[in-house]
Image (spheres, grey):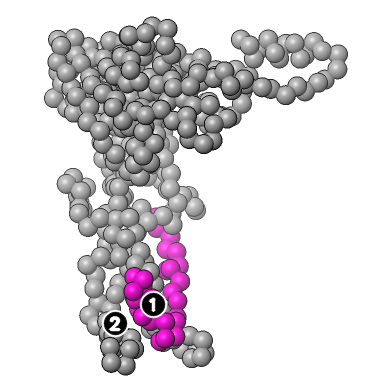
Amino acid sequence: MKKILALLAASLSVAACIYPYDPELDEAPEGVLSVDANICIGGTSTVRLGTLISMRDWSGSGWVDLYGAHVWVEDEAGNRYEGKPGYPDAVYGINYMMGLPFFTIDTENAPLDRRYRLRIDALGESYESDWSECIDPPVIREIGFVADEEKVTVNVSVDGGESGTGYVLLTYEEDWMFHVDYFPSYVVVHDEVADTWNVMEGSPDFSKYWCFRSTRSNRTVPVDYTGRTEEGFTDFPLLSFARKDSRNQRRYCVSVKASTISRETYRFIHNLEENSEGGDNLFTPNPGEIAGNLHCESNPEKTVLGYALFSRAATRRAYLGNDFYIPIPAYPLLYPLPDNYGDLYQSGFLPLEEHLGEYDTSKEGPYGWGPQYCYDCTAAGGTLEKPDFWSETE
């Protein structure tokens, strides 16, 4: 409303003037708890906590310690499901170092016919969400892949089902098999008497050529299908990746979760996305104006920001081969003189390719050397352990 009044006032002015906007950051409430909670009954729930600090404080002294926070879910029968601190990736690891914890809660065996709420003890206060019922999930009809000249798009088709509200929340996880550019096939030997390093041919080592990689997206995608003639939606573009991406090298798997959500939940998530991604808009609510479903039980006057989403999710996986892959050039190697072999070897470099054709022997050596991440897929962010669900035939 303030934004609309400001627009009307400007339109009535005789002269067009631009005034600087001062958001009065010094008066911003610091230490306010923020909550990002996805409570999945019949699956694993996650809760991430944070706090507000002034934008004028770049020293980090404004960060509030949340290490001692306690998080749990309870049902209306009094059963508790305790939250366990967990940091599934580097991003959450950074949050942990800053005192911003992430929790997982095992709600896989929680009864489906009860109401639930989230409880939090943090910052010396007790917080709780409103009671919520978990709506039956929609049906994921199909997951498809289409490609243009540059990218692959994952499309999702969903039926709302009998309990459909017209609103669905989509999340996804990705796993794929990829390879590095080279495999070791030379042996480096140190002659201690002559103090020289020599390269000899050996057997190719393929043990760390192929790896698996996973990403657990924090992105939630709300979909409104209330204006469609069908009770659901078809070929919704959920995510995209480049055709040159390592996801396309051999086999890719996407696991999609779809939850039925209420109109209020949709509006909260959609408005939050507009604030995060849509830029300045006169009709976009300020983050502090978006009503959530959390409140401070011990101090009703205290502000808490965020939302606790309660849902039951339908899950479906789909696999893609290397049909759309566009290969990219291999990592460029160094061709050092033999005098530098020792330093490179001790730094993790290995000879990976022999120089072909003529070259200047005063400037380059006979072998191309590369760092560990171009011949060891575990150093490139992968793991040799295959996911339990992985299939080569689906």
**N-terminal label among 1 and 2:** 2
Q: Nearer the viewer, residue 16 or 262?
A: 16
Span shown in magenta: 323-351
- Determine if the magenta segment contains residue 338: yes
How far apart in space, not on screen, are marks 1 and 2 (Cα)? 12 Å
Q: Nearer the viewer, residue 143 or 8?
A: 8
Q: Against 253, is 210 above or below? A: below
The reply, left or right, for residue 272 in relation to residue 7 is left
Mark 1 sits on what residue?
343
Q: Which mark is residue 188?
A: 2
Magenta region, mostly helix, strand or loop? loop
Q: Secondary structure at mark 2?
A: strand
Quarter that holds the N terminus: top right
Residue 4 pos. (x, y %)? 66, 12
- Determine if the magenta segment contains residue 37: no
Query: For the point 43% across and 48% down, which residue is it?
Result: 241
Q: Farthest residue in the bottom direction?
A: 194
Label 2: few (<14), some (14–19) or many (≥20) C-alpha neighbours in 10 Å: some
**Three-letter amino acid code of the residue under disc 1:** Asp
Query: For the point 40% across and 21% down, which residue is it?
Result: 33
The reply, left or right, for residue 16 in relation to residue 66 is right
**Three-letter amino acid code of the residue under disc 2:** Val
Specify the quadrant of the image occupied by residue 318: top left
Q: Nearer the viewer, residue 67 or 286?
A: 67
